[in-house]
Amino acid sequence: MGISIQDKLALLEKSEADWVNTLAEMVSVDSGPGDTDGADRMVGILKDLWKELGWDVEVQHAGAPVVLARRPGVGPRILLVGHYDTVFPSGTAAERPFEVTEGRAQGPGSADMKAGLVVQAAAMSVLDDDRCDLMVMTNGDEESGSIGSRPLIEALAPEADVVLVFEPGEPDGAIVTGRPGVRRFRIGTVGRSAHTGVEPELGRNAIEGVAHVVLAVAEVNRRGDFGTVTVATIEGGSRPNIVPAEATILIDGRVPTQEAGDRLAQELARVASSIPVSDVSGWLEPLEDRPAFVPTEESTRYAALFCRLAQEAGVEVSARPARGSSDGNFTAGMGIPTLDGLGPPGGSFHTDGEWVSVGGICIRAAIVAGFIEMIGKD
């Protein structure tokens, strides 16, 4: 007979300082975009962490190093997903070192999602039995779209009966049962260069063309047919004395369904082909396509179980869709029951004020351990 969630929580709280120190060690490592040294250091921390727990560990390279830790079992197969990369540039950890104030830990990537990685390990440290076949996959390119690791995620997911994603919980502790899909596009305009002083009339201004596109995209967003559509970057021109011959914008769309994403692509293709500037043409390049994470009957049932077990830990946890995306979009998009937001409650993600609940580390870990055991028993 396994120990109760309350007993698991009591055990974890005795070692809370150790888990917080593990989080501090992770947050002290810059692991932002392109930081290969930071990625290697995070891989080393994770390998040591899982080996100490007695798990089998290997490292694969998929865009960035991916740490795979496995503990074979005889029951349902569960894939636990996380990422060690952050959005912050090298040097941020020194500028904003890890600190704990009034029960909140702060530092780059503390919530998104290094605390979630700590919860994974802490939960496994109080797991009672081996009735579930468990694999933990931690990638290093989630914040840049999981371009390299997506094939690996989609290869591992069909082997799982349920996927647990350890992105931070919502600020009030809610777990995540759905997320919008992501569609990103680049639209460019092409005109003709000329000297702005000698013969500007011979030029065809690509920036003028892309300005019309920006306004058209803003109108698409106001309509609300496709979720939210944002012009995120704009580039064009080379020198002040040259009529710009090329300009581009990057568009970020957050779509409620795959169908909405397809319709958005069609609408943007129409915009790109209808530049209202003489002799300026446009083109559309589809970029990221992350499927929508839509709740299913089975994932909703798992969420209800998680919330019920949270009561045994003495906390109220709700479940609802969130507005951001994660690698859970890929697994849910494949039809695999997926629960997300299982990291501790946190907030102000991707900002200088990012925070995560210190007490939430042990609470989340106890619930996750009880949840996995319950799946094994069922």
Image: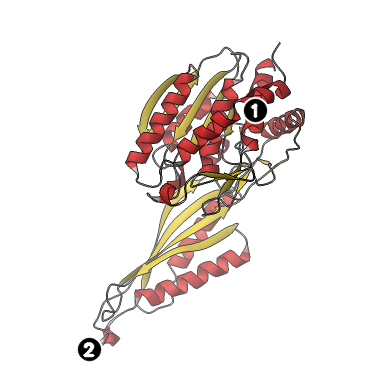
Q: Nearer the viewer, residue 68 or 292?
A: 68
Residue 207: x and y in percent read: 37, 74
Q: Are marks 1 and 2 in contact (CB under 8 Å)?
A: no
The part of the image, by quadrant, that contains residue 134 is top right
Q: Residue at the spot x=37%, y=29% of the render?
A: 60
Residue that extends furthest to the bottom in the rendered view of this protein: 198
Res. 112 visible in picture: no
Q: Is residue 10 left or right of residue 208?
A: right
Residue carrying label 2: 198
x, y percentage for residue 53? 50, 19
Position in image of residue 218 (x %, y %): 54, 68
Residue 105 location (% of width, % of height): 57, 43
Location of the N terminus (image quadrant): top right
In the rendered structure, which amino acid carries the disc numbered 2?
Val
Q: Image height check: is 94 above or below 166?
A: below
Q: At 25% across and 88% down in the image, what residue appears?
A: 197
Q: Is residue 167 above or below residue 10?
A: below
Element assignment for label 2: loop
Residue 358 visible? The answer is yes
- Number of callouts in the render? 2
Residue mark closest to the camera, 1 vs 2:
1
Q: Nearer the viewer, residue 85 or 177?
A: 85
Q: Residue 56 sits in which quadrant?
A: top left
Query: Mark 2 or mark 1, which is nearer the start of the sequence?
Result: 1
Give neighbour class at mark 1: few <14, some 14-19, many 20+ (Cα, 10 Å): some
Side of 191 where 153 appears, left or right: right
Q: Which residue is located at x 47 percent, y 67 percent? A: 271
27 or 199: which is nearer to us? 27
- Asked which secondary structure carries label 1, the reply is helix
Labelled disc at residue 13: 1
Give the side of residue 347 with respect to residue 49, left or right. Answer: right
